[in-house]
Amino acid sequence: LGNEDDERRASAGDEGDDGEELFGDQMERDYRPIPQLDTYEGEGLDESSRADYDAIPIEQRLAAEEEMRRRDRAERRAAASQGRMRRGLLYDESDEEDDESEQPPARRRRLMASQHRDHDEAPDEDLPEAIENLEDMKGHSVKEWVSLAGPRLEIKSRFRLFLKTYVDVNGQSVYREKIRQMVESNKQSLVVNYNVLASNCQVLAFLPEAPTEMLKIFDEAAWEVVLGLYPKYSRIHNHVYIRIAELPLMEDLRSLRQLHLNQLIRTFGVITTTTSVLPQLNMIKFDCPKCGFILGPFYQDQSQEIKPGSCPECQSNGPFEINMEQTLYQNFQRVTIQESPGKVAAGRLPRSKETILLADLVDSCKPGDEIELTGIYLNNYDGSLNMANGFPVFATIIEANYVTKKDDKLAVGSLTDEDQRQIFALAKDQHVAERIVASIAPSIYGHNPIKRAIALALFGGEAKDPGGKHQVRGDINVLVCGDPGTAKSQFLKYVEKTAPRVVFTTGQGASAVGLNAFVQRSPVTREWTLEAGALVLADKGVCLIDEFDKMNDQDRTSIHEAMEQQSISISKAGIVTSLQARCSILAAANPIGGRYDPTMTFSDNVNLTEPILSRFDVLCVVRDTVDAVEDERLARFVVNSHVRHHPRKDDDNGGDGESQPPDEDEPLRVGSGGPEKIPQDLLKKYIYAKEKVHPKLHRMDQDK
């Protein structure tokens, strides 16, 4: 080796500063034989056993080499299965691939699948290290940290793993089932429980501090999971939205401050106004009018308008036109949420807040609905606000992420299997009608005919459309008239708390437009819009009208069409339409002079015209008669009811017989012994289940 180095240095000196010439006349000189260099050094060679190796035939040598290769492959596989070394890291896999090519195709596919699975699961082994690195934000804010590529990729992979692997107590994959239900319904929203997410992926708990960036990451990860399970779902939708439910802290609209800006909040209230659904720019492309070049895409956000600088083709500064064909839009709706009347402090006026609904959240609520809202509290520039208060003042809005109706009246959004079994068992009871009547307003003594009429109105009849020529209503209208102090208004209040869909109004405060529909100018578009009244809002429900006799004759005649044809025709401000009002009307009225006169007819006792009386199917008269025995039983019932429901009732004070439920009054209700009452929760669900039943009149029933 030393001689060769000398020759190279000598040749380098001959070349001078021009360097060594590798290709030229002297190229063959490098391949001349040098005997002193063409021999192996003796150090490290076992000359004693060389003769033994030379005597081995070539077939045995090949078999031994194959055996050694097989042994090395087995060791590498064992090391890879234990996570010590990834396959192919130190050794060439060409021999292994040659060996695998000789295997059957099915076995080869299984082996390749196991290799990819080992490779994909390798990063999960460093999970604790990733959590420590992700929590250490290196001086960045949460918003800046989750915007970086490394943390963004880690959060995305963690959330994707959470959707795939989270199981409930029964070992069932929760979100795979939710994704299946979402795909079956062709929806775009996947609801994720925040508490479950925070308990299984603790680092994702800083979602409320940077909701905009985190939700984008969640949406991308969920879309990848959905496409992995259902690859062809991209033909229906091109995006999936993660909806965050059950945020722990509930905020009042009155308590929102600067602290909550750009954070995820959860609040509640009543929807007062909604706009129509409008298209909003999502992904924009512009046309250059000078050269025809298409600029973009630009992604529009809620804060400011996107404007391109110059055309990269002709360097023109515009103006540019929006390419309507290639621009993508999304649904947009603006609603106003107001504080619930029961939550406002005494002497305060309820406050309201503008809310933006995007994508598939539009039309998820209507005016009058009490909702719970999870969204991002944002601020935007408002020119009129700055003119009035001085610059810089910003208006605040809530960009909704998840909307759910707060249904306190009837928790039957999804009937469980146990509820269905109870409903079917109740339907098979032969005395179910008497039990329902006895369960209507159990705190009101007597009045069984009125309770039976209310039960008929709650369950209703079956609408018929013979031959498609004219429609016959199936809802039952009830008018209760009688002496004052006979619990007429209490019956209406009970129905308001029991029926699935109820609108309550009074005759003194109701007008014709308030009952039917009215036209107002939209504050956003400044166009005339149609707003629904009480009868329209109570569609497929019950409309309660108290003090029906106090209404004006002009207002009372406006509900004639709604009570019989169950529709309301409107022709105002250039709007000509017909609205559905398929509801039962339950009204209460006082007789002329304050007390009912049994010597006169019903129409003479009530200040109502004959056309309006003919539209009521059931007329109930309540009289306060003088009966000492009945009055004593009524007084005992009222006293016992007050004792049982007293907020400070103690078990020691309820020892006497009168404080217990009055069994002696039960026979007075229906029949001897009185039927067993139905629990109020089950009664609500039983009334709700009437929508699934459509009885028919058979020949046997007609013969009866």
Image (cartoon, grey):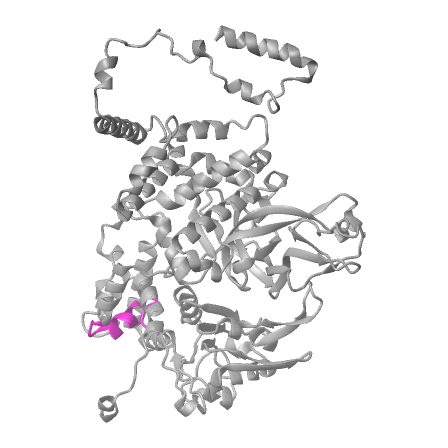
Quadrant in the picture for the C terminus: bottom left
For the question of whether residue 168 can be seen, the reply is no
Q: Is residue 314 visible?
A: yes
Q: Quadrant of residue 295?
A: bottom right
What residue is at 30 percent from the left and 84 percent from the top?
696
Q: Is residue 581 left or right of residue 379?
A: left
Q: How many marks?
A: 0
- Residue at the spot 78% in from the left edge and 60% down from the top edge: 289
**Residue at image coords 51%, 26%:** 136
> Could you say where residue 169 lies in the image, as x and y percent from the top left?
28, 44
Q: Is residue 434 magenta?
A: yes
Q: Position of residue 34 (x, y in %)?
A: 47, 12
Q: For the point 34% across and 69% down, which residue is it?
A: 687
| 517 vs 420, nearest the viewer | 420
Write the start and end of the magenta stretch as one range: 428-446
Q: Quadrant of residue 199?
A: top left
Report whether 220 appears left or right of 295: left
Magenta residue check for 528:
no
Q: Is residue 100 above or below residue 335?
A: above
Counting from the top left corner in percent of width and height, residue 453 is at 36, 78
Residue 414, x across and y down, in percent:
35, 60
Seen from the viewer's position, the closer of residues 475 and 696 is: 696
The residue nearer to you, when weighing 149 against 253, is 149
Vertical position of residue 297 compared to residue 562: above or below: above
On screen, residue 503 above or below 552: above
Q: Is residue 276 left or right of residue 317?
A: left
